[in-house]
Image (tube, rainbow, N blue to C red):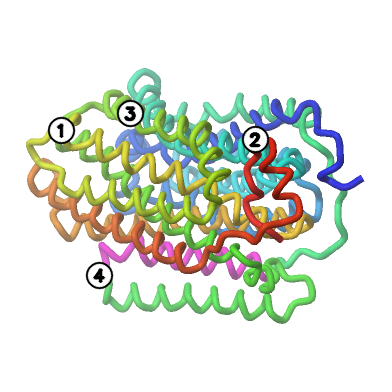
Amino acid sequence: MSQSQAAPNPRRWSALALIALAQFMVIMDTSIIGVALPEMRTDLGFSQENLSWVFNAYVVAFGGLLLLGGRLSDLFGAKRMFSAGWAVLGAGSLAAGLADEVWVELAGRAVQGVGAALIAPSALTLLMMLFGGNPKELTKAFALYGAAAPAGGTAGVFLGGLITEYASWPWVFYINIPVAILALVATPALMPDAPARRGGIDILGAITVTAGLGTVVYAVVRAPETGWTSAETLLVLAAGIALTALFLLLQGKRAEPLMPLRILRTPGLAGANLAQLLMAGAWIPMWFFLNLYLQQVLGLGAFASGSALLPMTVAIMVMMIVLAPRLIARFGPAPLVVAGLAALAGGMLWLSFVRADGNYWVDVLPASLLAAAGMALAFIPSLGTAISSARPEEGGLASGIVNTSYQIGSALGLAAMTAVAAAHGAREVGNPAALTDGFSAAFLGAAAIAAAGALIAAATLRKPAPTAAAPAASADDSPEPLSTH
């Protein structure tokens, strides 16, 4: 019996709740530490320039190992890797919470990133296994899964402020442990089994891609301090590019590569991944600098700042769950990606007009809601196109690639816009006018990234050709498949 003919899993919606929880948690772990950083700096002895590595240690390990996580999911089964990822994430969270030295804290954060790199691609593979046979349910499942990402990002800011204010910073890590235990208990009963496949693991490929991506991120993060044209920046950046090029060279020569290069020729996959990378490169800086504007310019506290971002999160979740599936059914994924990235660019451009003497209702809320609408429209169809374009046996690999695109886009976009903001006055803490100039420049830069994404998506994504199943799908108002194979 084919996948499309098989009886649906009766526990698929409960399983989807756990999959969405996984997405919520791995994204929340990128944002929850923001408000806690000053206390961590005092307690652990971080220098100001090294403090950003509490964020970057997680993101680099997460983004750099996602391809390996996807490969392991394909070889050993998504269910096994999903459970293994939760165990690793829980262990890293415990280590990060108990840390009393800088190196222990960074090691714990890196281990958290390793766990996330196992969870994320296996979660998407499990989603496809559960819903891939029903295009209408698949679009709904992607909507719920996608809504968990912005919810996790905003909840991280909100919970980080709440926990830091009323408990202590280690609890921003300890909060993961009961969730990991719950996931480990629930996974055996909820998730479908996938047979293990025979094949090798490209360890050298995993090392070179992780080192290459990590080195590039390191160069961009350090550039504002060392100078973009300094010898250190240029040499480190060249080393990262060389390692990434070596990885691609190795993939073309190996019998069982970590990332078969032919997958990049899959129609729609490269364009969808570029859309995800540039979307993250615009969205994450917007969230980061908007939070700083609320606190450092408008004078809101951590708790109030997190609360001020809730309307944006609610708007994204409602649009992803209710509106996006209907629009995908009506127009197809490609136009939605283009329109969404264009709206995201418009929201960023609007935010670039923030004022030092502004207020939340005029300067923040309308523009942030437009940006949220753009994110809601673009995220689901670009993610779905990237995953469903690959062959079923390469679902974990496709999941790893698209998650890598998003995480590396996040890291590079934030690093680059941090440099832009600093160059335009954001270094002058305590000077609202200078800070506003810097944040405005960062919003304008993020708008350019999103606009570039819209143009690239328009050039690379095409509406899929009609299939034999299309008439049947339209008969019950089901969405079209997100892409064709």
Against 79, residue 406 (above or below) is below
- The residue labelled by disc 2 is 19
Sequence-first disc among 3 and 1: 1
Q: Is residue 447 visible?
A: yes
Coordinates of residue 458 in the picture (x, y in percent): 45, 63
Q: Is residue 58 left or right of residue 127?
A: left
Query: What residue range appears in magenta?
Result: 204-226
Q: Secondary structure at mark 2?
A: helix
Mark 4 vs mark 3: give the one in front. 3
User: Where is mark 4, residue-wise?
Assistant: 227
Q: Magenta stretch: residue 214 in it?
A: yes
Q: Nearer the viewer, residue 446 or 153?
A: 446
The CA distance from mark 3 to mark 1 is: 13 Å
Q: Decide: is 101 above or below 399.
A: above
Nearest to N terminus: mark 1 or mark 2: 2
Q: Secondary structure at mark 1?
A: loop
Numbered circles on residues, count: 4
Amino acid type at image mark 3: Gly
Amino acid residing under circle 1: Leu
